[in-house]
Image (spheres, helix red, strand yellow):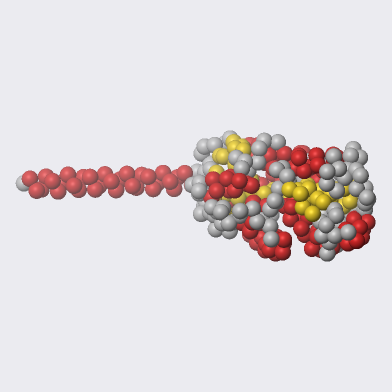
Amino acid sequence: MRAFRINRRVAAVVAAAGLVAGVTSGALADTSANWPSRSIKLIVPFPAGGAADTIARIYGEKLSDALKQPVVIENKAGGGTAIAAETVAAAEPDGYTLSLAPAGQLTILPHVNSAIKFDPFKSFAPVSPLASVPYVLAASPDAPVSTLKELVVAAKKEPGKFTYSSCGPGTLCHLSGELFKSLTDTDLLHVPFKGSAPAVNALLGNQVNLSFDTLTVLAPQIRDGKVKGLAVTSRERSPLLPNVPTAAEAGLPNYVVDSWFGLVVPAATPAHIVQRLNEEVIRIGKLPDVRERLEAQGLSVTTSSPEAFAQTIRADYDRWGRVVDAAGAKIN
């Protein structure tokens, strides 16, 4: 009789455990099916302010309206964007953690930093690119060149004489300079800084001859006549700098550099959530006020399907990997 009671108790415990498991499983399924039912976090790998933060806040505001839930921007700078990427890679794949991923984070950082704890292809599910901005090659006020052709001729005559600042070693600013060197067969001396602000200040103060940075950073300085704009790296001229030629117009047709910013989520995020996010992002990108706000910063809307975005990541990863190998650019 005692054994029977024990067995009944064991059976009750087992049944209760099964009920709890069933409820938990059902709750998880409901959470996914009813997504979103609470606030969403959008992680930005840079401090507040700047192009990336602007993009995140514009899209985040519209996503919040569309999904009927708050989209909270969390700025998590550090590690050359690695800290933010590692945070997102380790997050639950439930649709409540999103990441604003800059091109350099997924296509350059893995090549230059072997210590990172994420894989650009296995750790994330691409949703869509959001916006892109071209780079600009600018010369200091006292630089002895005023055009791209003059620079190439002068740099070939005196290898190593011309210096260029970048926003940091292993960044797209740096590798834009290395790509330029390889395409023109010139030798420029790289002077890295911790961020765009000190790199541009060095250019303004004639401490370096050249600088490679985004249109957002350099356009105001060029418009004000403080530095010389030699070329933009887009396929067409920028409305913000209509008098600055494209690299192709200036004689360097293969020098095209776009710094894109995309939306990714942790790998294994349910496909229907990825698809919903993609649909909303594409819709948001078509809104006139969104385009106007981004274009005012020199940014262009560049949305696409998750599949097309994945192809872009792979192509840029391979392209910049070749540049890194040629330059020997490593940060650890």
Q: Is residue 13 left or right of residue 273?
A: left
Q: Is residue 295 left or right of residue 58?
A: right
Residue 126: quadrant of the picture: bottom right
**Residue 32, image x, y percentages:** 48, 47
Q: Is residue 86 among what the camera can see?
A: yes
Q: Is residue 279 among what the camera can see?
A: no
Q: Nearer the viewer, residue 44 or 166?
A: 166
Residue name at image x 67 percent, y 35 percent: 48
Residue name at image x 72 percent, y 61 percent: 327
Residue name at image x 62 percent, y 41 percent: 77
Q: Nearer the viewer, residue 191 or 3?
A: 191
Residue name at image x 76 percent, y 40 percent: 198
**Residue 57, image x, y percentages:** 67, 38
**Residue 72, image x, y percentages:** 59, 36
Residue at the extreme left of the image, as rendered: 1
**Residue 161, image x, y percentages:** 85, 55
Residue 21, compared with residue 254, is above or below; it is above
Q: Nearer the viewer, residue 44 or 300?
A: 44
**Count of all numbered marks drawn on residues in the image:** 0
